[in-house]
Image: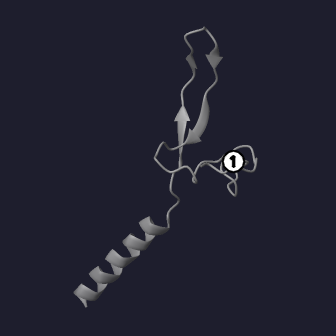
């Protein structure tokens, strides 16, 4: 009985983490460019080598402003 309980607990914890939402965005802090232009804080997609998971790629929608993607990415 103890092993069955531990197995069910392990499986439920696995599914809890497997189903949780992936954070696909990164907060960018405000900064000044070299020419003195101020860039406001904003969110961007997590940097990686894939082009099709960016918010600007066709078929994706930016969750912060609701805009649809417009680029093909290749």
Count of number-bearing discs: 1
- Give the residue displayed 53% in from the left and 59% down from the top: 21
Task: In this rendered view, identify the residue nearer to me: 21 or 38.
Answer: 38
Q: Position of residue 46 (x, y in %)?
A: 50, 44
Q: Residue at x 64, y 13 (%)?
A: 37
Crowd tier of the residue under label 1, counting other residues whose Cα lies within 10 Å: few below 14, some 14–19, many 20 or above: some
Residue 59 appears in which quarter of the rendering? bottom right
Indicate whether 47 appears above or below 21: above
Mark 1, secondary structure of its residue: loop
Q: Where is residue 60, by image quadrant?
A: bottom right
Percent across and percent down for residue 74 are 59, 49
Q: Quadrant of the N terminus?
A: bottom left
- What residue is shown at x 40% (from left), y 76% (from top)? 12
Question: Residue reaching furthest front?
Answer: 74
The image's colour scheme reads: one colour
- Nearer to us in this view, 3 or 60: 60
Residue 14 is situated, as x and y percent measured from the top left of the image, at 38, 71
Point out the residue furthest to the top here: 36
Vertically, is 13 above or below 24? below
Q: Which residue is mark 1?
A: 71
Image quadrant in which you'd find residue 17:
bottom left
Front position in the image: 5 or 50:
50
Q: Residue at left 75%, top 50%? A: 68
From what the image shows, is residue 35 above or below residue 47? above
Answer above or below: position of 16 versus 68.
Answer: below
Image location of residue 44, percent across then percent down: 58, 39
């Amino acid at each position: 009985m103890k092993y069955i309980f531990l197995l069910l607990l392990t499986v439920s914890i696995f599914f809890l983490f497997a189903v949780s939402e992936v954070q696909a965005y990164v907060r960018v802090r405000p900064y000044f460019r070299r020419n003195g232009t101020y860039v406001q804080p904003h969110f961007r997609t997590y940097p990686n080598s894939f082009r099709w998971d960016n918010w600007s790629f066709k078929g994706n929608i930016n969750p912060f402003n609701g805009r649809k993607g417009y680029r093909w990415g290749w």
